[in-house]
Image (tube, rainbow, N blue to C red):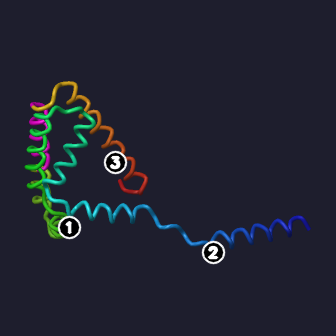
Amino acid sequence: MKNVVLIVCLLVTTCYVTAQGHPPKKGHERGDLFEKMQEFTPEQRAELKTKRMTLDLDLTESQQQQVKNLLVAEERNRPKPEERKKKKEDISSEELYQKRIARLDSQIAMKSKLKEILTEAQYEKFEKGNHQKARLKKRHHMRQGRK
């Protein structure tokens, strides 16, 4: 008799839990926010990045202005998301190779320019933060089943 009551309770609980609606996933909300942020102008995106770096690295006024100018130039050269999606479908391996080389070259140039602007302690803190962000991003991709 106890087994029957236990089975009925489990069955009722299972039906009750599966009948409940699932809450909206946070990924969808974040996707909407990401789309809105993509509509920012290059100057706005550079300003936000500069403010974040100022908070993290305690930049001086002149450093803020130099970093902002550097980031504005970088943001203006960045392709729009629509362009990146279109080109992914029709790109050859050689073009992909050239694009990646160009991106890495621009990252190397950006690092060298930041080294000139930041003090040694600020640059070390900047690098440490970038390595942590990269690890978190990699972990996030691994959790979602991407490799």
Nearest to the observer: residue 38 or residue 17: 38
> Residues at badges 3 and 2 in contact (C-beta under 8 Å)?
no
Q: Position of residue 20 (x, y in %)?
A: 61, 72
Marks 3 and 1, the one that precedes in the sequence: 1
Amino acid type at image mark 3: Lys
Marks 3 and 2, the one that precedes in the sequence: 2
Q: Position of residue 79 (x, y in %)?
A: 13, 60
Q: Which range is magenta?
A: 103-116
Q: Residues within 10 Å of mark 3 (few under 14, many from 20)?
A: few
Please report the residue visible at 19 percent of the width from the left and 53 percent of the height from the top: 45
Q: CA distance from mark 3 to mark 1?
A: 20 Å
Residue marked by disc 2: 19
Judge whether residue 20 is colored magenta: no
Classified by dominant secondary structure, the portion drawn in magenta counts as helix
Q: CA distance from mark 3 to mark 2?
A: 35 Å
Nearest to the observer: residue 77 or residue 52: 52
Nearest to the observer: residue 90 or residue 109: 109
